[in-house]
Image: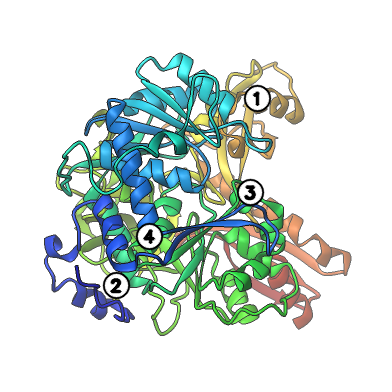
């Protein structure tokens, strides 16, 4: 097997189109994720594939796994799963952080049948629903751990999911559960005992979308879907065998498994896994640049929250010479934050736009682009169509009417990375079309150079860091309060997390409740801890459309005015008058800031105080 030419420098749409000279079938070097790992064994052998940090302290203990070893462990896991009854239509469910054994289960599950990584922050009811909807026969879960309460949930799932044939524990045998690493050790490491020939159209996994309500919503990925994203990202980031990246994303998130997982393994790079807690480990973030220097990290996968944290601290004297770029995934990237990071650290920042239903990526900025295009999330992947669809067709979107360059519509994508649909096909309409389009739900446009811009969301998903939160789930729980007539959950702009969930409430006639009482009532009912509202606001009435639906843009404008007003309070203390007005246009939501008695220093302070907020604004200054 010959190594591909990895010295391609993708700079612009012409370079992407050059990659499309190969047909879609010949574009991918292999047919399955298992074959991609076999390719890694053959090409990169003893080079480090995974490095797991046992602690968050630089110089602490770590363990390495080569590309050859990773393929062997994945193959052994697949053969164990086959023995436990997993076939092509069955799933291996996972409740585990991003540790080496989780990679064995993920890719081994795809080689034996399907993988279904599940968010361990969900409550047990949700987890059981997802495990059953996936058709899981095996559950691999992290054993008892002082910091992560996963095992008790795994035991509850075992008792409530009758389709499970086995539960395997990571970190040692438990009562009724074999140790996963020990269980795979006796199986062949060089071949699949099932004799299975995996094709690109075979289902590889089912990933749950953020913010499920009661009914599971699992997006199916084929092997071809995952390879399309991983191989394309590998090329557009110019991933090389000498590269290393810190991947603190969870594997149940497509950023952790595909964008910053398989894409780097495909290029022969090393992935550093920062403890069982990932980026939640305080020492990993506090000593981030020391870890970068120690492990010679060259690519920094991140979310805006990490950038905000790094920008809030003095630039260290640590050696950063190994770093060639940072790429943002998980949530939108504020342009001003990216500018500030590049100016402070001298490290290029690149953005990526995708979703679970696109296997992780729709568009991304190539590392070798001459400069970042402000406000853009990059170019479509090779062999990918991206349009801004008209807003007047069925379900409000008509993909047969793409908008002209620069004109806003609903972004839609079609290509080898697009999921074939949900496990429940009744949930496909409005997201998947019969002719292969994925309706993203994001408002945006495509410019004359092919760059994709996201300007808002027609769907109301709240993105807190890398967590996708369905507001309907939050509203359902808030509406259970006996005093609540109606509620609306929105994303409040936040300089650190991008958005925070907040709820606006109208009370029933004659009812009484405080904001604090409602928040205390709803907190234990929310399945996802990141989805718990930060604040509750009681209004006399919620704004409504002519059809009686809550008009959330008006609430978002109120939220912008409130948050910006609070953030700019220090200016008022200095005698500057501040008036913030939320604005809505075809380009999305923004703020107009009127300053009275302000000088250039006050204007600069506004920029500093609002740095990181994912909302555009304009300033008007009067003497």
Label 2, residues with CA under 10 Å away: few <14, some 14-19, many ≥20: some
Q: Position of residue 80 (x, y in %)?
A: 33, 34
Going from N to C along the chain, the mark reached first, 4 or 1, is 4
Residue 181 to residue 137: above or below: below
Q: What is the C-alpha distance between the residues marked 4 and 1?
A: 43 Å
Q: Which residue is mark 4?
A: 67
Nearer the observer, 231 or 479: 231
Q: What is the C-alpha distance between the residues marked 2 and 4?
A: 36 Å
Q: Nearer the viewer, mark 3 or mark 2?
A: 2
Q: Position of residue 152 (x, y in %)?
A: 58, 24
Going from N to C along the chain, the mark reached first, 3 or 2, is 2
Going by the image, does 35 lie left or right of 184?
A: left
Q: Which residue is mark 2?
A: 450
- Image quarter for residue 482? top right
Going by the image, does 120 lie left or right of 208?
A: right
Q: Quadrant of the C terminus?
A: bottom right
Q: Secondary structure at mark 3?
A: helix
Q: Which residue is mark 1?
A: 524
Q: Secondary structure at mark 4?
A: helix
Q: What is the C-alpha distance between the residues marked 2 and 1?
A: 46 Å
Mark 4 in CB contact with mark 3 (< 8 angstroms) = no
Residue found 29% across the figure and 80% down from its top: 8
Which disc, if any, is residue 559? 3
Mark 3 in CB contact with mark 2 (< 8 angstroms) = no
Residue 304 to residue 600: above or below: above
Q: Nearer the viewer, mark 4 or mark 1?
A: 4
């Amino acid at each position: 097997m010959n190594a591909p030419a990895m010295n391609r420098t993708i700079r612009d749409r012409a370079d992407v189109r050059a990659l499309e000279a190969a047909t879609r079938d010949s574009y991918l070097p292999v047919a399955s994720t298992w074959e991609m790992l076999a390719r890694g064994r053959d090409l990169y052998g003893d080079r480090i594939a995974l490095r797991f940090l046992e602690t968050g302290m630089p110089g602490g203990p770590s363990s390495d796994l080569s590309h050859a070893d990773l393929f062997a462990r994945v193959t052994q896991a697949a053969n164990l799963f086959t023995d436990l009854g997993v076939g092509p239509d069955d799933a291996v469910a996972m409740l585990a952080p991003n540790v080496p054994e989780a990679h064995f289960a993920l890719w081994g599950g795809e080689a034996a049948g399907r993988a279904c990584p599940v968010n361990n922050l969900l409550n047990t009811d949700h987890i059981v629903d997802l495990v059953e909807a996936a058709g899981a026969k095996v559950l691999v879960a992290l054993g008892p751990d002082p910091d992560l309460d996963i095992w008790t949930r795994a035991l509850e799932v075992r008792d409530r999911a009758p389709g499970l044939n086995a539960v395997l524990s990571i970190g040692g045998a438990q009562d009724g559960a074999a140790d996963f690493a020990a269980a795979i050790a006796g199986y062949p490491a060089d071949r699949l005992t099932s004799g299975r020939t995996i094709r690109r159209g075979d289902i590889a996994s089912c990933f749950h979308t953020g913010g499920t309500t009661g009914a599971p919503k699992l997006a199916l990925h084929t092997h071809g879907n995952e390879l399309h994203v991983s191989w394309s990202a590998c090329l557009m980031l110019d991933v090389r065998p000498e590269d290393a990246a810190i991947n603190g994303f969870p594997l149940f998130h497509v950023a952790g498994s595909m964008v910053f997982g398989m894409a780097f393994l495909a290029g022969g790079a090393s992935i550093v896994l920062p403890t069982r807690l990932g980026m939640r480990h305080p020492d990993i973030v506090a000593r981030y640049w020391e870890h970068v220097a120690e492990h010679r990290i060259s690519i920094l996968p991140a979310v805006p929250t990490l950038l905000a944290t790094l920008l809030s601290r003095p630039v260290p004297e640590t050696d950063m010479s190994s770093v060639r770029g940072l790429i943002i995934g998980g949530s939108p990237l504020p342009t001003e934050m990216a500018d500030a990071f590049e100016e402070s650290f001298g490290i290029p920042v690149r953005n990526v736009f995708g979703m679970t239903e696109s296997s992780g990526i729709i568009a991304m900025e190539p590392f070798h682009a001459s400069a970042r295009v402000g406000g853009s999330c990059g170019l479509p992947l090779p062999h990918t169509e991206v349009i801004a669809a008209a807003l007047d067709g069925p379900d409000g979107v008509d993909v047969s009417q793409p908008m002209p360059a620069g004109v806003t519509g609903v972004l839609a994508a079609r290509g080898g990375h697009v999921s074939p649909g949900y496990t429940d096909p009744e949930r496909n309409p409005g997201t998947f079309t019969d002719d292969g389009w994925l309706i993203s739900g994001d408002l945006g446009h495509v410019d004359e150079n092919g760059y994709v811009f996201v300007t808002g969301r027609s769907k109301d998903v709240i993105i807190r860091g890398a967590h996708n939160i369905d507001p309907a789930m939050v509203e359902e729980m808030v509406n259970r309060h006996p005093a609540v007539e109606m509620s609306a959950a929105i994303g409040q702009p936040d300089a650190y997390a991008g958005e925070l969930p907040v709820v606006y409430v109208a009370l029933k006639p004659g009812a009484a409740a405080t904001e604090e009482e409602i928040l205390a009532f709803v907190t234990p009912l929310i399945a996802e801890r990141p989805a718990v509202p930060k604040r509750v606001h009681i209004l006399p009435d919620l704004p409504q459309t002519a059809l009686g639906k809550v008009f959330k843009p008006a609430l978002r404008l109120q939220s912008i005015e409130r948050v910006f007003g609070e953030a700019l309070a220090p200016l008022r203390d200095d005698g500057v008058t501040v008036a913030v007005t939320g604005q809505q246009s075809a380009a999305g939501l923004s703020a107009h800031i009127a300053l009275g008695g302000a000088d250039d220093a006050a204007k600069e302070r506004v920029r500093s105080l609002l740095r990181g907020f994912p909302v555009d604004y304009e300033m008007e200054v009067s003497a």
